[in-house]
């Protein structure tokens, strides 16, 4: 039997949970299908040691509920994953969300039935469900990728991907552990694992520019102050480019003296969070000459923290400037490499040839290991869409439509896929954001549209080809001036482990959250211009 709902939401992470809550308020019959056994999305899956926020906890939580803001207390400025998962469960309890969520239900396919103006989804195992509207809340970094190295699967020891980390405790004491990858995930994991490991070998292909997190516990005085200032905190986030608490400095890097610049960089380096990335001089992520000044500063910092000069050079990125890839925040990462039981293998010098039953073989030697950790990242932003067989009008597959890069309107809909909404989808400001801040905007906007449609007796919404073309062009325009678009990273759709993901593709919206929000509001005010409603 196929059950019918008004709306089906895929995913019970931060987006899916809030979307469910808002649609229930409209009195709609909603069903959420979630692959995991619990709520939380990213925070459910990414249980690797050291996983924690890089956003200030008190800027990350939902802002819509006074009760939740009052009752929940973050214990650290940058909460660790178990605390964030507890928060997600607290919200799910508070809003009684679980009764409309089906867990252990991974959506395999979604097909638009033109005759009935309905979406039909197929859950792994064969069960089906139907709804007028389909909302994907599947996350931008939720499709983990294993490296395409020969022999993966042959290894006889323990092997884990950071994004599908076991729920049971994993121990490192006395073990020879190898980790592949040095992205934001690996930087957190390496630092934590190094505290107890027997021997750790880090297999690094591309070093990143890491900056100090400076996490600490929230004092009772700070807790009281945070609770009293929530409205102000969220207003500050709302006005900033990526909805972080850090506002870009109005000055240009080169208009101040070298002494002033140095002092400013030192100040940012000593402060918590993404300030050094998001609160830096306004041109460091746009102007190569300005960027070179902060890059040089960061280079000196690495040299000052790593005792072995040759090792320090290996940890210094050569192919991109500071902030042009996602900046990992760290809590003693560089000092880990001063430990006698930690070794860095530079894969540019000695590439991995294969995984063997005993460990990892590079062009120079075989590293015998008890455990291999794959911190090899995700098929970012479009990967989770590609893994579902989504078919729109005429049976056209979304993956095929997006083969040369995503095409969307507002990063929320794609022409040919009526009544499908893509929260935090490609070309949406939420992809470059302190995500819950943008999620709330996305969800509120979609909810208002569904409410307006219901009031007007409309049942179908889809963007015009022209609106989609214009938005996609706009997305490319906003990206062109940014230095990150000249660098390979997941933000540019590069993943060496996925066929076809070797060309730089604009995946994110780089115009900033305030501009994006303004545009969404204009579209609504102009009667949903760019959409065909019937
Ligand atoms: P990332 O940032 O994509 O990092 C993946 C890392 O794994 C990166 O260092 C890669 O090197 C490395 N990698 C991937 N495949 C291989 C192979 N085949 N051989 C060697 N090394 C490899 O993923 P994260 O999980 O760290 O972070 C993703 C985001 O999730 C992060 O920004 C947070 O916002 C949350 P490469 O750089 O490709 O040379």
Image: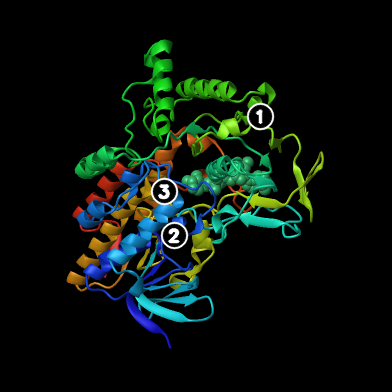
Quadrant hosting ligand 1? top right
Which of the two labelled residues, at mark 3 and mark 2, occupies the earlier sequence position?
2
Q: Quadrant of residue 248?
A: top left
* Colouring style: rainbow
Q: Compare residues 55 and 295 and report the one nearer the observer.
A: 55
x, y percent for residue 91: 31, 61
**Circle 1 residues within 10 Å: few <14, some 14–19, many ≥20:** some
User: Which quadrant: the N terminus?
Assistant: bottom left
Which of the two labelled residues, at mark 2 and mark 1, occupies the earlier sequence position?
2
Residue at 69% across / 53% down in the picture? 148
Q: Which SS class for mark 1?
A: helix
In 3D space, how far apart are the residues under numbered discs 3 and 2 (Cα atoms)? Answer: 15 Å
- Measured along the vertical axis of the image, is residue 503 above or below residue 160? above
In 3D space, how far apart are the residues under numbered discs 2 and 1 (Cα atoms)? Answer: 35 Å
Count the marks: 3
Q: Which SS class for mark 2?
A: loop
Residue at 33% across / 64% down in the picture? 92
Q: Is residue 357 visible?
A: yes
**Circle 3 residues within 10 Å: few <14, some 14–19, many ≥20:** many
Q: Is residue 533 visible?
A: no
| Badge number at residue 431 | 3
| Badge number at residue 314 | 1
Q: Is mark 3 within 8 Å of ligand 1?
A: no
Residue at 26% across / 64% down in the picture? 22
- Measured along the vertical axis of the image, is residue 154 above or below residue 274? below
Q: Are marks 3 and 2 in contact (CB under 8 Å)?
A: no
Q: Is mark 1 within 8 Å of ligand 1?
A: no
x, y percent for residue 67: 21, 57
């Amino acid at each position: 039997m196929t059950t019918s709902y008004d709306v089906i939401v895929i995913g019970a992470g931060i987006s899916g949970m809030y979307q469910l809550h808002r649609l229930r308020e409209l009195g709609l019959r909603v069903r959420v299908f979630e692959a995991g056994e619990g709520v939380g999305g990213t925070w459910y899956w990414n249980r690797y040691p050291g996983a924690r926020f890089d956003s200030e906890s008190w800027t990350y939580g939902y802002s819509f509920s006074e009760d939740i803001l009052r009752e929940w207390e973050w214990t650290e400025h940058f909460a660790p994953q178990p605390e964030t998962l507890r928060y997600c469960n607290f919200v799910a309890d508070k809003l009684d969300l679980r009764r409309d969520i089906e867990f252990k239900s991974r959506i395999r396919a979604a097909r638009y039935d033109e005759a009935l103006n309905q979406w039909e989804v197929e859950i792994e195992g064969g069960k089906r469900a139907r709804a007028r509207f389909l909302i994907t809340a599947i996350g931008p970094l939720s499709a983990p990728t294993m490296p395409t190295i020969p022999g993966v699967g042959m290894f006889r020891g323990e092997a884990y991907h950071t994004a599908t980390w076991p729920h049971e405790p994993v121990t490192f004491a006395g073990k020879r552990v190898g980790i592949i990858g040095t992205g934001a995930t690996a930087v957190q994991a390496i630092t934590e694992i190094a505290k107890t490991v027997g021997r750790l070998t880090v297999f690094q292909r591309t070093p990143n520019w890491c900056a100090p997190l400076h996490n600490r516990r929230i004092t009772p005085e700070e807790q009281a102050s945070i609770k009293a200032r929530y409205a102000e905190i969220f207003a500050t986030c709302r006005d900033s480019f990526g909805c972080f608490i850090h506002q870009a400095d109005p000055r240009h890097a080169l208009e101040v003296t070298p002494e002033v610049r140095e002092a400013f960089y030192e100040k940012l380096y000593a402060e918590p969070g993404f300030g050094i990335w998001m609160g830096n001089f306004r041109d460091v992520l746009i102007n190569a000459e300005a960027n070179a000044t902060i890059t040089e500063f960061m280079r000196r910092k690495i040299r000052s923290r790593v005792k072995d000069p040759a090792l320090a050079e290996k940890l210094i990125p050569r192919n991109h400037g500071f902030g042009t890839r996602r900046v990992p925040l760290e809590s003693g990462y560089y000092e880990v490499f001063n430990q006698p039981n930690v070794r860095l293998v530079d894969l540019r010098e000695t590439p991995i040839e294969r995984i063997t039953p005993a460990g990892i073989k590079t062009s120079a030697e075989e590293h015998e290991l008890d455990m291999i950790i794959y911190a090899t990242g995700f098929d970012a932003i479009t990967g989770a869409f590609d893994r579902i067989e989504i078919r729109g009008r005429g049976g056209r597959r979304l993956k095929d439509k997006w083969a040369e890069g995503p095409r969307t309107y507002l990063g929320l809909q794609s022409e040919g896929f009526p009544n499908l909404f893509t929260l935090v989808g490609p070309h949406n400001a939420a992809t470059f954001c302190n995500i819950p801040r943008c999620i709330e905007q996305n969800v509120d906007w979609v909810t208002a549209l569904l409410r307006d449609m219901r009031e007007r007796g409309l049942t179908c919404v889809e963007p015009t080809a022209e609106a989609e073309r214009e938005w996609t062009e706009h997305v490319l325009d906003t990206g062109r001036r940014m230095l990150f678009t000249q660098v390979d990273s997941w933000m540019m759709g590069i993943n060496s482990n996925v066929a076809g993901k070797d060309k730089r593709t604009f995946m994110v919206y780089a115009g900033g959250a305030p501009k994006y929000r303004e545009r969404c509001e204009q579209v609504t005010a102009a009667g949903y211009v760019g959409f065909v409603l019937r």
